[in-house]
Amino acid sequence: IAIFVGLVGYSFMQLQGTERKRMFAAIYFVLAQIPFWALFEQAGSSLTLFTDRLVDKEMFGINVPTPVFQFLNAGYIVIFAPIFAWMWIALSKRKMEPSTPVKFAI
C-alpha cells in the first residue's frame, strides 16, 4: 500500500493545472468508494436483520415479508435507469449535459 501511495503521490506532483485537478478528483472518487461499498454490502446481512427485528413491516394491513425489502434497491434501479438514460440524452442534445462528477453525485 505504501508503494502505491508513493507512486500516486509522485505522479500527482508531476502533473500541472487541469491534469492535477482531474487526478485529485479521481483519487477522491476512488476513496469515496471504500465507505460506500462497505455500507452497501451490509444490505444482505445487517440491514436484513435490522428490518426483521426492528421495522414495522405492515403496510395497509398486509404483513410484508422481510426479503421483499431487499428488492427495493434493485427495483429503484430498474425503474429509474431508463428515466436517467433518457434525461442524459435529452440534456446532451440541448448542450446542458452535467459533468461526470455531477452525474456521480446524483
Image (cartoon, rainbow, N blue to C red):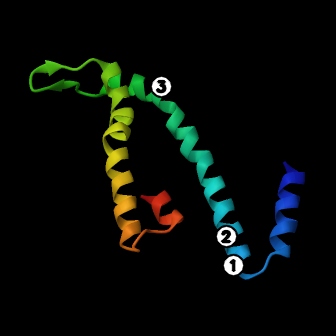
Amino acid type, mark 2: Arg
Q: Which of the 4 image quadrants contains residue 98?
A: bottom left
Residue found at the very far bottom of the displayed protein = 17
Could you tell me how far apart the alpha carbons at marks 3 and 2 are, in whole angstroms? Answer: 34 Å
In the rendered structure, which disc, 3 or 1, sits on the residue that comes first in sequence?
Answer: 1
Q: Answer few, some or many: residues within 10 Å of disc 3's Cα (few below 14, many 20 plus, some between 14 and 19).
A: few
The image shows a total of numbered marks equal to 3
| 79 sits to left or right of 59 | right
Q: What residue does disc 1 label?
A: 18
**Cα distance between the residues tagged 3 and 1:** 41 Å
Separation of residues labelled 2 and 1 (CA atoms): 6 Å
Q: 50 and 60: which one is in front? A: 60
Residue hosting label 3: 44
Residue at x 37%, y 45% (from the top left corner): 81
Closer to the camera: disc 3 or disc 1? 1
Q: Residue 9 location in percent, x, y?
A: 83, 65
Are dots 3 and 1 in contact, CB under 8 Å? no
Residue 40 x %, y %: 50, 38
Q: Secondary structure at mark 1?
A: helix
The residue drawn where x is 78% and y is 80% is 16
Point out the image quarter for the C terminus: bottom left
| Left or right of residue 6, residue 32 in this image | left
Q: Nearer the viewer, mark 3 or mark 2?
A: 2
* Residue 98 drawn above or below residue 81: below
- Which sits earlier in the primary sequence, circle 3 or circle 2? 2
In the orientation shown, which residue stands out farthest toward the left? Answer: 61
Cβ atoms at labels 2 and 1 below 8 Å apart: yes
Where is residue 10 shown, x and y percent of the image?
87, 67
Secondary structure of the residue carrying numbered label 3: helix
For disc 2, the marked residue is 22
- Give the residue type that dot 3 points to: Gly
